[in-house]
Amino acid sequence: MTDSLPADHPGGVRHEPGVLEPWEVFRQEKDGDPMKHGGSVMAPDATLALHYAREMYSRRQESVHLWVV
């Protein structure tokens, strides 16, 4: 699985401690498939949102790519 978050992405900076924001997750089941909305996760920043998305959508190899926005 590949995914990325730019190092300068503003979501990578923590805002107020404990404040959760919704992050939308798009996933690709296999190479060549379109990205589809998989759901959302609640997280205080982009780093944790990506971590939560990996746990929910790629633990059992059901996704090859994730976008978290």
Image (cartoon, helix red, strand yellow):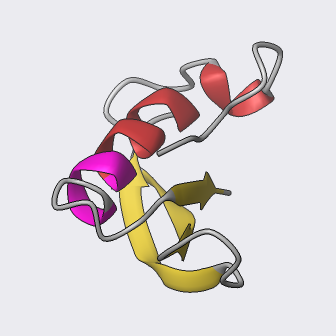
Figure check: 60 above or below 52: below
56, 46: nearer the viewer: 56
Image x and y of residue 45, in percent: 51, 34
Work out whether 19 lies above or below 25: above
Which stretch did the figure color magenta?
53-57
Residue furthest out toward the front: 31
Position of 8 with respect to 15 (left or right) is right
Image position, residue 8 (x, y; %): 83, 15
| Residue ID at (54%, 20%) | 14
> Residue at point 62% right, 68% down?
31
Residue occupying image coordinates x 34% and y 48%: 54
Does residue 61 appear to the left or right of 33 in the view shown?
Answer: left
Residue 39, percent from left and from top: 43, 80
Quarter residue 51 falls in: top left
Residue farthest toward the right in the current orientation of the protein: 8
- Counting the numbered discs, the total is 0
Snapshot quadrant of residue 60: bottom left
Classify 19 as above or below 29.
Answer: above
Q: Residue furthest left?
A: 60
Q: Residue at x 49, y 28 (%)?
A: 47
Q: Name the spot of residue 68 as percent of width and height, x first.
A: 60, 55
Q: Would residue 35 appear left or right of 51 to someone viewing this image? A: right
Q: Tell me the quadrant of the picture where the C terminus can be found.
A: bottom right
Left or right of 66 in this view: 9: right
User: Is 9 or 35 nearer to us in this picture?
Assistant: 35
As drawn, 50 above or below 9: below
The magenta stretch spans residue 7: no
**Dominant secondary structure of the residues highlighted in magenta in the image:** helix
